[in-house]
Amino acid sequence: MPSVAIIIPTLVGGQILRACLRALEEQTFRDFEVIVVNNGETSIESGLVNVPFLVLSPGPNIGFGAAVNLGIRHSSAPLIATLNDDTEPDPHWLERLVQDMESDPEVGMCASCIQQYGVDLLDSAGMLLCLDGSSKQRGANRPSSAFPQSEEVLLPSACAALYRRRLLDDIGLFDEDFFLYCEDTDLGLRARWAGWRCRYVADAFVNHHYSFTAGAFTPLKARFVERNRLWVAIKNFPIGLLLQVPGTSLMRYLWHVVAIRRRRGAAAMFAGSGYSVRDALLIVAGAHWDTLLRMRELLRKRAGCRKRRKLRSSEFARLIVRHRISPKEVAYA
């Protein structure tokens, strides 16, 4: 049985996936298996790379979380690495993650130093959370050397992360209802409630072609991100923070308006791609309507999370505040 299962969901396969697999050929840590979950209709040929891998084909696109869960269930490895197909990990990536996790049994998640492909800028050094439920990459667009020390962070981006199977056995797998985006935030917060810690491993480098599959600024991405941040808050926020979500959301919307006028941030790029204010309002309204329709199920999941918690609500709230990002920073990101 290998020590690590590396699970790679893919929608388009092709050259971008082959580059990822070729990077895994060079890993200095060799005790791993690779499971590719084919979420698309393209064929994946195993003979194009030297690293052996298993292909699981569930049929129509089942979403990121469901794809990773499928891979987890097909492996018995005690450590689970998640990796986007549009990433190219450094040869020492997996070795560094495993070493850091094995140094502390209370660490259940490790975040990589994810760099933007082809430039000396960070994509993610762990994740931050806004008090409206939005999550953003820590250090995005800052120099790659901005966080040179390994340290505790709130939670990892599942773009390139390592999880203990014991953590997943404890709190459950990724919430498949999210389909795309924020499922790693939800999983990470559930793990923090259960007392698990997360480490950022500064020398576990990964290069990332950001949003290669879904696109950086599309209605599809905006819809899922806006809806799922509400689900994150409802499932995981203690009452005191949950009551702040509407006001914080309004502040973020206002900052988006300012950012558009200053041609800054994702909203400005969204508007610059030809989408109107009406399109944005429909996305926001649709996200809230979907949330209302699923409220009973969300509250049931919230109760399940509380049954496993080891932190008091005040401890969890302090943890969130310590790793928060402001509405303005979210709008300008």
Image (cartoon, rainbow, N blue to C red):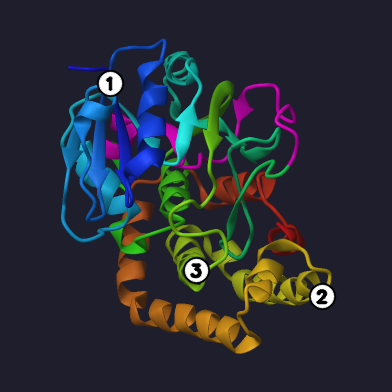
Q: Amino acid at mark 2?
A: Arg
Instruction: Determine whether 192 is above or below 34 in the image.
Output: below
* The residue stretch that appears in magenta: 142-169
Relative to residue 307, is residue 246 drawn left or right?
Answer: right
Cα distance in 3D space between marks 1 and 2: 49 Å
Specify which label sits upstream in the sequence, 3 or 2. Answer: 3
Asked whether residue 280 is in view, the answer is: yes
Residue that mark 3 sits on: 230
- Vertical placement of residue 29 versus 224, above or below: above
9 vs 102, left or right, is left
Q: Quadrant of residue 235?
A: bottom left
Q: Nearer the viewer, mark 1 or mark 2?
A: 1
* Mark 1 / mark 3, whichever is N-terminal: 1
Q: Label 1 is placed on what type of residue?
A: Val
Asked whether residue 157 is drawn in magenta, I would say yes
Report the side of 234 relative to 68 (left or right): right
Q: Amino acid at mark 3?
A: Leu
Estimate the x, y position of residue 249 in percent, counting from the top left.
64, 73
Q: Which of labels 1 and 3 is toward the front?
A: 1
Say which residue label 1 marks. 51
Element marked by disc 1: loop
Look at the picture and state if 320 lies above or below 147: below
Q: Which residue is mark 2?
A: 261
